[in-house]
Amino acid sequence: MHASQLGFNPEYSDAEPSIEQVNALTGRALLEFGAPWCGHCQAARPSIEQALAEHPSLMHIKVYDNKGKPLGRAFKVKLWPTLILLQDGKEVERIVRPVHVAEVADLLTST
């Protein structure tokens, strides 16, 4: 399955993909775990959006995380926002609570 076939909303979505859907992704994708009311997520949003603007073809899946949410637990997410870069459904690298555009840009260019 290609990331673009998931069709998730660019806002944090309660309709998170299953771990099976994530594992089946082909190509590169960015999972962003957070919550719309989270101050750290709100503060990071401009940096994330600016860095993503340089990668328009990268699938960006925003997951509304919370206690007991299976995808966040599968990726051992503890703090928000957590950005996880995937290649073919497998984690390549992650950053937690980015502040600067450069942090996110470095993540997006990881191999």
Image: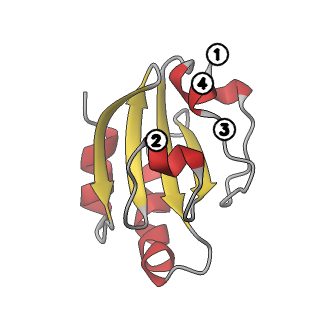
Calculate the distance from the C-alpha at mark 3 to the C-alpha at mark 4. 8 Å
Residue 16 % position (x, y): 67, 46
* In front: label 4 or label 1: 4
Do the numbered discs 1 and 3 sit on residues whose CB atoms are within 8 Å?
no
Outermost residue toward the front in this view: 68
- Residue type, numbered disc 1: Met
Q: Secondary structure at mark 1?
A: loop
Q: Amino acid at mark 3?
A: Pro
Q: How far, Cα to Cα, is label 1 from label 3?
A: 12 Å
Hey, what amino acid is under mark 4? Glu
The residue to which callout 3 is attached is 17
Q: Nearer the viewer, mark 2 or mark 3?
A: 2
Report x, y in % for residue 37: 60, 81
Q: Residues within 10 Å of mark 4 (few under 14, many from 20)?
A: few
Q: Badge 2 is on which residue?
A: 74
Q: Nearer the viewer, residue 12 or 44?
A: 12
Instruction: Verify CB contact (< 8 Å) between mark 2 and mark 3.
Output: no
Tag 1 residue: 1
Kindly indicate the quadrant of the structure image that contains residue 13. bottom right
Name the residue located 60 percent from the left edge and 24 percent from the top edge.
Answer: 20
**Closer to us: 97 or 4:** 97
User: Which residue occupies 49% across, 69% down?
Assistant: 45
